[in-house]
Image: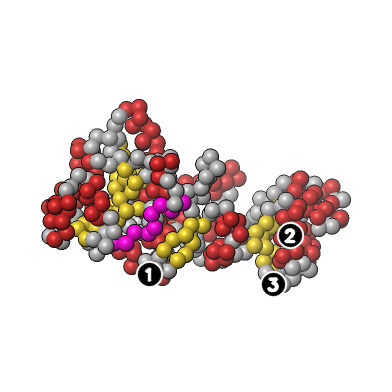
Amino acid sequence: MTEQATLPLSGIKVVEFTHMVMGPTVGLILADLGAEVIKVEPLKGDNTRRLMGSGAGYFPMYNRNKQSLCIDLKNEKGHVVAEKLIEGADVLIENFRPGAMDKLGFGYEAMSAKNSGLIYCSLKGFLDGPYQHRTALDEVTQMMGGLAYMTGLPGKPMRAGSSVIDIAGGMFGVIAVLAALEERHRTGKGQEVKSSLFESTAFMVGQHMAQQAVSGNEPQPMSVRTSAWAVYDIFDSADGEQVFVGVVSDTQWRLFCEAFELTEFAEDRSLDANTERVKQRDRILPVIRERFSALSKTDLMAKLDQTGLPFAPINKPSDLFDDVHLNESGGLLDLTLPGGEKTKLPGLPVNMAGRRFGVRQDLPKEGEHSEAALKLAGLSEVEVQELIEAGVIRRA
């Protein structure tokens, strides 16, 4: 467990009204960095806890290091309690449909009037504009933002294999929160900050928009693109396994030819420059594929590693549980799943002053910290018990 007092965001209080991935990602990052995050859930708990299929991993991945408060926000007493928490918070996070927080009485205008220093972070489908009323999902904006087009085959758009827009939108939300906290140091005032799925998608495909602006040609899906490099492909090894190899500079090309004894290519001056090699891919790649097909995956990767060239085995997510680097570098964190099973999940992918960020609080049970959170808000033991007996809050 990491000592909270030594963490970068120690002392920052966050109240989180979120579900699914985008909002919880913001709370996760802030919590991993040391903020005290209270996750406000309905009495039955966050519905994300009960998702199945591809959503079964959402709650376990994005809710460590948080405290769970289960409360009836539609009850007048519950509403008052939530307001007290917000009045003492530095940051509020919400990612519900447009207008939902206003209807509950927890909109930005109402809460900033009670806490002028509050940073109010809203995660939405769209920023202000003609689409702002729409409800969006990660996959919706991947489709309308061009990412699914660039990921799939021609005529067959395909979403990316992770909730990349939810996660990226959450990260942009964190950036905005941290910038607002810094600005508050100068002004003493909080502000509303927003991040969105659609604009995050547009930012991520901006490189393809710029490509078209530079080249004058509409970019093709990545699956059939014209590569920027002659060697930037997936190759088969002798044992039927696959390895990705990239040779992305003229220096790397010379090292590559030497390592794999490609004398004909090394001596051919027409291949010295990458632009010329790209033009001769049809000549180069068959020779390389034949050379690689004679080596096992282990031998091929060992030679590439020794030479210092970019390469990667074609892994499944399940392979990462046993990845040597992730395990030895602290990249995987020990967590307990709701059913009691133990697992390891990826930690925050940053290093600050030589330290990684770990687990201070395992995945919270529904209402596990309800009593502690209310006492933190200034309620007495008697008041807390009254709320429990009235069914306004739930204990684990």
- x, y percent for residue 303: 76, 58
**Magenta: predominant secondary structure element?**
loop
Badge 1 or badge 3: first in the primary sequence: 3
Q: Amino acid at mark 3?
A: Gly
At x 35% / y 30%, what residue is drawn? 185
Instruction: Kindly tell me whether residue 202 is visible in this rendering.
Output: no
Look at mark 3 in the image and give the residue it sits on.
240
Query: x and y percent of residue 128 in the render?
Result: 32, 44
> Nearest the camera: 237 or 3?
3
Report the mark closest to the observer, 3 or 2: 2
Secondary structure of the residue carrying tag 2 is helix
Q: Is residue 39 magenta?
A: no
- Which residues lie in the magenta part? 358-366
The residue that appears at 53% across and 59% down in the rendered structure is 151
Judging by the rendered image, the residue that carries numbered circle 1 is 339
Q: State the image coordinates of residue 235 (x, y, percent, origin top left).
A: 70, 64
244 to the left or right of 173: right
Question: Element under label 1?
Answer: loop
